[in-house]
Amino acid sequence: MSITKLLTACGFALASLSLAAGAHAAADTTPTTAKKTVKKSTKATKKAAKVEEAPKAPDEDADEPAITDSSVTEFDCELGNKISIYANTGDDSHIALRWKKRLHRLTRVGTTTGAQRFENKLYGLIWIGIPAKGMLLDSKQNRQLANECRNAEQLKPVTATSTEPTSTKITIQ
């Protein structure tokens, strides 16, 4: 028997089983079970309506963090993007990040690599800062918003310390 004949036979068997199961379910309904299904569907509709009301749109005015008494660090990113980070000296577990004229509060997330990672789960923003640069990610759309972000200190050219070996004169006679 070839594989195509076997697959065709399996397809017919599955189709006949699904038709038989559908006919059996339709013949088994009685008036009492029909009432029960109506009640269940009404309850399910009410529950679905409650679930739809639960997720609320974020209130942009209430979510704005206070930035008084904070130190500001300006970052210049590739493609002309700019980010400002406001850090409060008394609270190192949160920062405020200004991105596209909007201020977001981000919470520190511990890392094993030593990188600074801050997240705002409501908006899906993730700020990752390493000594050489920083980047802003959007976890909801799985993309980078800003990359190669550097502050004034990171933009300074790196000067390598010169450790030239002392030249030794060798004369061959």
Image (tube, rainbow, N blue to C red):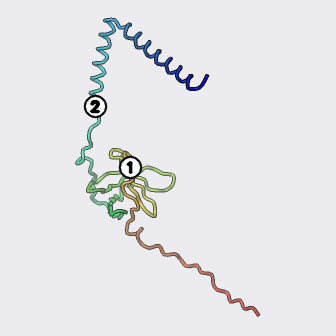
Q: Quadrant of residue 51?
A: top left
The reply to whether residue 71 is visible in this rendering is: no
* Crowd band around label 2 with a 10 angstrom C-alpha radius: few (<14), some (14–19), many (20+): few
Q: Is residue 57 above or below residue 89?
A: above
Q: Secondary structure at mark 2?
A: helix
* Crowd band around label 1 with a 10 angstrom C-alpha radius: few (<14), some (14–19), many (20+): many
| Residue at the (47%, 56%) spot, across then down | 115
| Position of residue 40 measured from the top left corner of the image (x, y, whole percent) | 31, 16
Residue bearing the label numbered 2: 52
Q: What's the CA distance linking mark 1 and mark 2?
A: 26 Å
Closest to the observer: 142 or 71?
A: 142
| Residue at the (43%, 14%) spot, across then down | 19
Q: Is residue 99 left or right of residue 7?
A: left
| Residue at the (62%, 81%) spot, across then down | 165
Q: Secondary structure at mark 1?
A: strand
- Give the amino acid at mark 2: Glu
Q: Quadrant of the N terminus?
A: top right
Closest to the observer: 149 or 59?
A: 149
Residue bearing the label numbered 1: 119
CB contact under 8 Å: marks 1 and 2: no
| Position of residue 49 measured from the top left corner of the image (x, y, whole percent) | 26, 27
| Labels 1, 2: front one | 2
Q: Quadrant of residue 4?
A: top right
- Give the amino acid at mark 1: Glu
Q: Quadrant of the C terminus?
A: bottom right
The reply to whether residue 139 is visible in this rendering is: yes
